[in-house]
Amino acid sequence: MVGGILLLGAAGLPLRAAPDRELVRIGNAPAPGTRLFPNPALISSWWRDRHQPTPAKLGELVQASPQSRARSSTWPGTLYLGMGLQQFQQYADAANWVSFATARRGSDSQVVRRYMQPGGEGLYTPPPEQQLVYARGFLCYVYFIRDRLVGLRLVPDPQEQGFVLPQLMALVSAWFPDDTLTVYYQLQPSSQELFVQEALIGQLPVSFQADLGRGRSLPFCRVEIQPGVTLSNPPTRCNLALSVRPPEGQ
């Protein structure tokens, strides 16, 4: 089981279970209280207007964000699934991420979860949009297997205003411009601004499968992100319920 990855799939589309993996089966039944959120195009416009940097006065230094610890307002570095732990650490150090805790699982500690706060760095989505997005408003759990990045789990930072769905889509595109990714997310049901309750980029190690959805029992949405593409109209009616199914023969 050490080194296994928690694969996520839609109900009705069975996944093949590898001997050392567990699968999370996602049902299609809407959870009670699931609602249709406002037009995401309007929310996207609202988010861009709200997060555009204020023009600097003559001689004024431009900051990435009020909480930012990043050394510059924009950052050229990117991530990719499978990158080495040392490579990720170089990115995190340069962008001034803060590490709070590290957890290790397995007899040889091959599975690692790092609890971190991003540095508020600004990144641009790939051309032609080149939308500026900031890595702020959330805390990040970063997962590695055998020193290779397999996934990131994002939750709202209680000391900030949180993060919204258009920001998440832009950030995924800016962070991972060359990857094909599956992204899962929960939306706060009472939010008119599409605030995200939790998001998973990539996969979870089996050892940390209980992390997903631990905050609130809300349904998830799932989207597939292609390289160089920023989704402008992601689904806002989430109806995927999580359930764990062990591999056959286990």
Image (cartoon, helix red, strand yellow):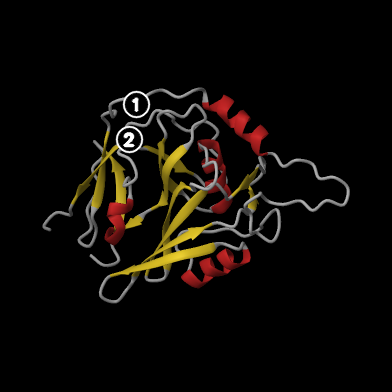
Q: Nearer the viewer, residue 236 or 229?
A: 236
The answer to whether one can see residue 140 in this image is: yes
Point out residue 162 in the picture as x, y percentages from the top left corner.
52, 42
Point out residue 215 in the picture as x, y percentages from the top left corner.
34, 45
Is 219 displayed left or right of 138 in the figure?
A: left
The quarter holding residue 42 reads top right
Q: Nearer the viewer, residue 84 or 191?
A: 191
Is 80 displayed left or right of 217 in the figure?
A: right
List the single residue furthest toward the bottom: 108
On residue 115, which mark appears?
none
Residue for badge 1: 34
The answer to whether one can see residue 125 in this image is: no
Q: Residue at x 66, y 57 (%)?
A: 75
Q: Nearer the viewer, residue 181 or 207?
A: 207
Q: Residue at x 56, y 64 (%)?
A: 92
Q: Amino acid at mark 1?
A: Thr
List the single residue furthest toward the front: 159
